[in-house]
Image (spheres, helix red, strand yellow):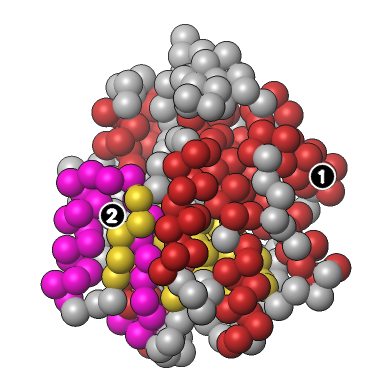
């Protein structure tokens, strides 16, 4: 998920997405699971994959919005199924993985870890972790581990399977490396809400985690000869409903409005913000460990230089396993 703003801003025209979709191969016979696809880039990606022939498993928390998104897909004649998935609950993630296994006997070709929350108050999930870190990274780490056998099965049967993580330009702002305290059960004690920048530090940590998780897992796949590819994308500054959720979760300060609105005046459309994950999910010529997105805040999604942090990747892996109890990775 990227830096986002609410709908009152003028909706930008879509510039690049149609050409990208036209370049993608058919996905008939493939199953693609996407988290956080009630709206925004997740729903655009779900529609695109379905248009290309894939069966789409929509992992969302049960809600009116989830039901409406599923109805949109089904009304269009797409093969889509809702899988209840609460990323603020490790138990809920494990149940979602079990549900996926029950309906995906031939494996999952793509797991797109798209869902995320942004800039919300310092609170703990029922598992005790930062809401942003658990929703954006830890639960996706656990989900990936739990469905790993399904990814390996698809790769064996059809020669290719993928994990696609969705980072953000906010991984660099405020600047700083990953810190172990954000991966521990410290929810509610990570800067609080009196300092407006603290919520953005928590978001930055979770989005940097998405990218470094990609590198850490892709290395393991390469070392063990796995056919599963692990990729990452960032959307750039993208006009979606994520700021609305930020405001509903606890309001926005003057700093929040400045950060969001100064960026969003230059934002591109939801469709153009979906370029990276759509490319990672469907393009034929992507490689394990690659990172795609616009070079600047908006523009064409391209292959980006690696942003490796070996120490950060090692810490992330150790802390994520400790937090989630994940066991099934390659």
How far is disc 1 from disc 2 in space, using C-alphas? 33 Å
Q: Is 75 positioned to the left or the right of 147 in the image?
A: left
Rendering quarter of residue 292? bottom right
Q: Position of residue 202 (x, y in %)?
A: 56, 29
Q: Is 103 positioned to the left or the right of 214 in the image?
A: left
Camera-side residue: 75 or 265? 75
Q: Position of residue 322 (x, y in %)?
A: 72, 35
* Magenta stretch in the rendered image: 51-76
Label 1–label 2 contact, CB within 8 A: no
Give the vertical position of 86 relative to 18 (above or below).
above
User: First in sequence: mark 1 or mark 2?
Assistant: 2
Quadrant where the image shows the C terminus: bottom right
Whether residue 45 can be seen here: no
Residue that numbered label 2 is attached to: 39
Q: Position of residue 72 (x, y in %)?
A: 17, 65
Residue 314 has which mark? 1
Q: Residues within 10 Å of mark 2 (few under 14, many from 20)?
A: some
Camera-side residue: 271 or 267? 271
Give the residue at x 26% y 59%: 12
Camera-side residue: 20 or 229? 229
Give the residue at x 32% y 26%: 249
Give the vertical position of 237 relative to 330 (above or below).
above
Give the residue at x 45% y 42%: 92
Q: Is residue 31 magenta?
A: no
Instruction: Name the element at disc 2.
Output: loop
Q: Is 7 positioned to the left or the right of 157 in the image?
A: left
């Amino acid at each position: 998920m990227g830096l986002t703003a609410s709908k009152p801003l003028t909706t930008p025209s879509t510039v690049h997405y149609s050409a990208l979709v036209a370049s993608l191969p058919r996905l008939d016979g493939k199953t693609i699971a996407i988290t956080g696809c009630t709206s925004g880039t997740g729903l655009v990606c779900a529609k695109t994959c379905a248009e290309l022939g894939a069966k789409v498993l929509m992992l969302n928390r049960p809600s009116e919005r989830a039901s409406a998104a599923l109805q949109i897909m089904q009304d269009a004649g797409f093969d889509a199924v809702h899988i209840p998935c609460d990323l603020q609950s490790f138990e809920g993630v494990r149940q979602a993985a079990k549900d996926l296994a029950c309906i995906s006997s031939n494996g999952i070709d793509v797991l797109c870890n798209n869902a995320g929350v942004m800039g919300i108050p310092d609170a703990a999930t029922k598992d005790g972790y930062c809401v942003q870190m658990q929703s954006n990274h830890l639960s996706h780490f656990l989900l990936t581990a739990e469905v790993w056998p399904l990814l390996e099965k698809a790769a064996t049967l059809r020669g290719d399977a993928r994990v696609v993580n969705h980072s953000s330009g906010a991984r660099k702002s405020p600047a700083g490396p990953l810190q172990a305290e954000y991966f521990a059960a410290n929810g509610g004690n990570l800067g609080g809400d009196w300092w407006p920048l603290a919520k953005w530090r928590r978001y930055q940590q979770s989005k940097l985690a998405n990218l470094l998780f990609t590198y850490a897992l892709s290395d393991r796949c390469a070392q063990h000869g796995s056919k599963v590819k692990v990729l990452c994308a960032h959307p750039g500054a993208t006009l979606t409903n994520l700021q609305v959720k930020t405001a509903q979760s606890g309001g926005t300060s003057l700093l929040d409005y400045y950060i969001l609105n100064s960026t969003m005046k230059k934002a591109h459309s939801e469709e153009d913000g979906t370029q990276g994950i759509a490319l990672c999910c469907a393009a034929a010529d992507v490689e394990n460990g690659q990172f795609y997105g616009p070079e600047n805040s908006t523009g064409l999604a391209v292959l980006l230089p690696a942003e490796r942090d070996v120490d950060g990747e090692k810490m992330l892996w150790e802390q994520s396993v400790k937090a989630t109890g994940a066991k099934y990775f390659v």
